Amino acid sequence: MQIEFAPHVEEIKKALDNKIEDSNIIADLKKLLEYRVPLNEAKRSLIKKYGGSEKSTGRKLKDIRIGEHNIEITGQVVEVTRKTVNIKNVEKILFSGVICDETSSRSFTAWSDFNLNPGDVISVTQAYVRNWQERPEVNFGPRSKVTKLTTKIHVMEDCELKKLADLRDGDINVHTQFTILDIDMHEINTKDGPKKILGAIAADEDTKLPVTAWILSPELEAGNSIDVKNAYVRSFRGVPTLNINESTIVTKLENKIEYIEKDRLKIGDLIMKDGAYDVVVEGNILSIRPGSGLIARCPECSRVIQRGMCRVHEKVHEKIDMRIKAIIDDGTGALTLVLDSRLTQKIFGLNIEEAQKIAKTNMSQKAVEDDIKRKLLGRRFAARGNMSKGEFGITLVASDAWEPAQTIQEQAQKLIGRVTG
């Protein structure tokens, strides 16, 4: 066998259960490649020609890569949530969750109802891997076959105690400790009907993090410092969120964990994280992004729309709103700062009605954006909010913003002091 074809011929023969001679496969493969058919497509064509079907390639979760197709995984469902999404104006139900094996955990999306439940150990063939927030996510499509197994997945029980700042999306079997700053009960609709859950804000010595508890427990009260074992982390709106379920062990601590808020974080350090909750940054406005100033939103879903057309709700009576999207830089890094209409008015100094008068006078909404640029570019601001990473880059959606009291002269003196020692 010609050595350059050997691995491809073996792959094709495996799919055909070795029923075809090597020489025939090589001849057909050469012919397709001479016609510039891509190698992978040529192999699939030959498998189909000889009546075979591609065999899934076994993968451990730590080894999967974005773009892989036809893989086989075996794992345990940690959590699953039913969702309704709108795809090209058609509502579709899908199921998303977390799956783990001995090596790692990953988020997954099942595009059909495979009747998955937390704790199920499953084998999935014909799965594929997509990019979700710069992470590989396993997808179970229409060709996927899901089989429930009676075997168990071994996950290490003695896990290392982690700080909240070290938790990452996809972490499972998490052991951490924190104080509950605030907690509320909510009722949500699940595939099994309405369910009461707890939403909390947790904090250790220097980090805050949202918590979702899928169980009710007397230890989960505001002011309690608790030890949590066998929890897991899943990103919600770009921010890592600690999840507590039936498998989690919650113990009240005797000692109190006190949260001490930092004045501000360096943007360079912040953007190295997956996401962050309720943090403060400070820097100079380097740029005002297009889409700042007056905008129109869909009254149904609040998406930004143009000419009264929403991509979900089609023709709507638009609702006028105002925002600022700015690039803020502190010398260590930069991110996109988003201010809603309330904060835009606070920083910009004009409300929506006054901004509309500027647009009307200049016969262009861009006049408002240009006015924002003139007033804000180069100025120093501080902002508090949640940082997330996604398809729109690194973004901090502010819950508050203000101009620091420290003057430029004071900053210059501080810098000179550093240089001169």
Image: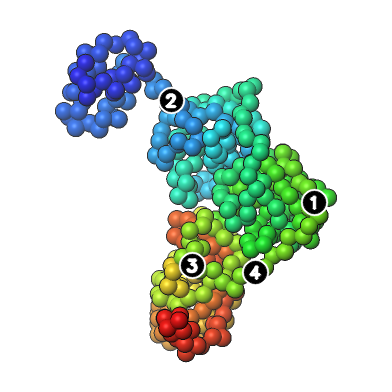
Sequence-first tag of 3 and 4: 4
| Mark seen at residue 267 | 3
Sequence-first tag of 1 and 2: 2
The residue nearer to you, when weighing 53 against 159, is 159
Please state if 317 lies on the left or on the right of 232 as rendered: left
Q: Which residue is mark 1?
A: 252
Sequence-first tag of 1 and 4: 1
User: What's the residue at 41%, 33% (across, down)?
Assistant: 69
Q: Closer to the camera: disc 2 or disc 3?
A: 3
User: What's the residue at 22%, 31% (across, down)?
Assistant: 37
For the residues marked 3 and 4, what is the alpha-carbon distance in whole angstroms?
Answer: 16 Å
Neighbor class of circle 1 (other Cα within 10 Å; few <14, some 14-19, many 20+) is: some
| Mark seen at residue 261 | 4
Quadrant of residue 1 in the image? top left
For the residues marked 1 and 2, what is the alpha-carbon distance in whole angstroms?
Answer: 46 Å
Quadrant of residue 340 in the image? bottom right
- Name which residue type carries label 3: Ile
- Name which residue type carries label 4: Glu
Query: In this view of the protein, can residue 302 be seen by the observer?
Result: no
Neighbor class of circle 2 (other Cα within 10 Å; few <14, some 14-19, many 20+) is: some
The residue nearer to you, when weighing 165 against 1, is 165
Neighbor class of circle 3 (other Cα within 10 Å; few <14, some 14-19, many 20+) is: many
Quadrant occupied by the C terminus: bottom left
For the residues marked 1 and 3, what is the alpha-carbon distance in whole angstroms?
Answer: 35 Å
- Name which residue type carries label 2: Ser
Q: Is residue 190 above or below residue 177?
A: above
Query: In this view of the protein, can residue 270 be seen by the observer?
Result: yes
Question: Looking at the image, do the residues carrying marks 2 and 3 touch, with CB atoms under 8 Å apart?
Answer: no
| Mark seen at residue 56 | 2
For the residues marked 2 and 3, what is the alpha-carbon distance in whole angstroms?
Answer: 43 Å
